[in-house]
Structure formats: C-alpha cells, structure tokens
Image (cartoon, rainbow, N blue to C red):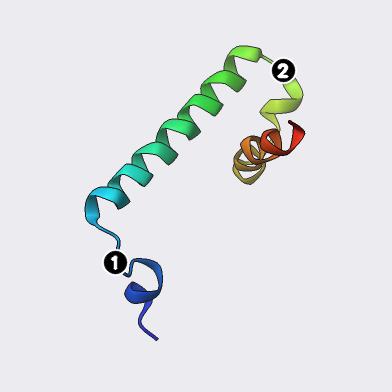
Amino acid sequence: MDWASIFIHDTTWSFAVEILIRVTVMFVLIITFLRFTGKRGIRQLSIFELTIIPITWLYRG
C-alpha cells in the first residue's frame, strides 16, 4: 500500500501548501474569536471540538 499515491496522488505542492495555510488561518481565527468572546464554557472545549464548530455552522443555515 503506497500512502503517497493514496493521499497525494496528483496534488501539486503549491496546492498542499495552500490547504495547510488555509487550515492554519482558520484555526487561528477560531481560537482568537473564542478568546475575545470570553465565555467560560468555550475555554473548556478540546481541540477536536473546536474543529467541529465551523462544520456545524454550515448545517445551521
């Protein structure tokens, strides 16, 4: 099983770097937003739960 062909296949490095930058920017924006809101309950969320928040916003409409 060749992991590189499964996950990367025909992806260019510039596209992979763009995805990495977009993910990093979104993560930083979410963390910054949650810090400024100052809610205690949000501070107790795990990293996994923080990544789920934008996905659930899409389904709320």
In the image, residue 9 above or below residue 2: above
Q: What residue is pinned by disc 1?
A: 10
Label 1, secondary structure: give it.
Answer: loop
Q: What residue is pinned by disc 2?
A: 39
Q: Position of residue 56 (x, y in %)?
A: 71, 39
Label 2, secondary structure: give it.
Answer: loop
Q: How many marks?
A: 2
Q: Residue at x 62, y 46 (%)?
A: 48
Q: Position of residue 1 (x, y in %)?
A: 40, 86
Residue located farthest toward the left when viewing the structure as drawn:
13
Q: Residue at x 55, y 27 (%)?
A: 30
- Do the CB atoms of the residues marked 2 and 1 lie less than 8 Å apart? no
Q: Residue at x 67, y 36 (%)?
A: 58
Residue located farthest toward the front when viewing the structure as drawn:
61
Distance, label 2 to label 1, CA atoms, is 43 Å
Q: Residue at x 37, y 45 (%)?
A: 19
